[in-house]
Image (cartoon, helix red, strand yellow):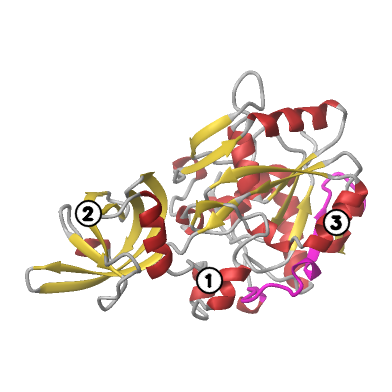
Amino acid sequence: MRVDDFDFELPPERIALRPARPRDAARLLVVRPNGEPVLDDRGVRDLPMLLEPGDALVFNDTRVIPAQLEGTRTRGEAVARIGATLHLRAGDDRWWAFVRPAKKLVVGDRVQFGGEGKACLLGTLDATVAEKRDTGEILFVFDLSGPMLDEAIAAVGHIPLPPYIAAKRGEDEQDRQDYQTIFAEKDGAVAAPTAGLHFTDALLAALDARGIERHRVTLHVGAGTFLPVKADDTDEHRMHAEWGEVSAETVAALRAVRARGNKVVAIGTTSLRILESAAQGEEGLAPFAGETSIFITPGYRFRAIDALMTNFHLPRSTLFMLVSALSGLDTMRAAYAHAIATGYRFYSYGDGSLLFPKDPA
């Protein structure tokens, strides 16, 4: 399909710069392509009554790390400033990162992170450029490893706010709380699974009272989620790999949910993508641990989920393509036009939507 098919105009004032407070006070647009009405303006707190007892929500338990690093490259007397966003761990002591400007680095260069000689608690955070790709990605091998490297990154790094927020304001201490879900447990993401940001203890209690199950998966969201689609045709686009896991326990629970006729509802596109990655074999949903670069566009047959709760996404993005695959491109274009016209807040800190699948033609 043409990437232009997934374009739309979004007024800048619709981009949320802070989350709703409390988190579950956000609005929720319910989209039922085969229902009446197709579009239903609700709130996140209505979620328990929009589902049936015995349905199951699946959350991503990844935790955002302060993966935005500033550093200096010294080559003789020549010094250059670079910015790096870690996006995929490649070993105990190494990370792939998007670097700007990548042209300042060559294999073998040494980089000191922290800015102006700033040291972390364990000393300066130094790395060597081990590999370079044409896409601007750099493989850094750090002098520290394992938990010591994790602590050093936490000391010198910054929360990597999405570019559409970072362009309007700087990161602050509040973001270290706001940009984590209450399910955040496993370090490794450089972007939050933002649908999960809407959940509070009060909302979880209401879901429990309604008899809605909760299960967890892991997908360490990479910075590639923010990269624009530069190809003209979706067939020419390649996704960046992300690491994820679906446990045998979660698989058994979700199989039981669907066997009794209830729905599996993915909370966020990240949960959806790792579940669909785990459902590609002949046996359907199965335990999974590894990298995935799944790319979902209209025509895809969903195997693991029955509905999706997600935020509102960028035009021409792989995530708008994904929601169009689930609920239909025409339906989603109408839903987004309605959301813009009626003041919904967009993107990571914005409002949510609950999407049901379009019946196959």
* x and y percentages locating residue 162 in the rendered image: 52, 67
Residue 43 shows in this picture = no
Distance, label 1 to label 2, CA atoms, is 29 Å
* Horizontal relation, residue 136 to residue 341: left or right: left
Q: Secondary structure at mark 2?
A: strand
- Which mark, by number, is residue 164? 1
Disc 1: CA contacts within 10 A as few (<14), some (14-19) or many (>=20): some
Choose between 245 and 154: the one closer to the eye: 154
Q: Which mark is residue 205?
A: 3
**Is the C terminus in the top left, top right, bottom left or bottom right quadrant?**
top right
Outermost residue on the front side: it is 122
What type is the residue that disc 2 sits on? Val
**Which sits in the foreground, 229 or 81?**
81
**Residue at mark 3 to residue at mark 2: CA–CA distance:** 48 Å
The circle on residue 129 is: 2
**172 up-or-down from 213: above or below:** below
| Relative image position of residue 180 (x, y in whole percent) | 61, 62
The residue range painted magenta reads 14-37
| Residue 125 vs residue 334, the one in the foreground | 125
Residues tagged 3 and 1 counted as in contact (Cβ below 8 A): no
Question: Residue 166 at x, y = what percent?
Answer: 49, 74
On whether residue 25 falls in the magenta region, the answer is yes
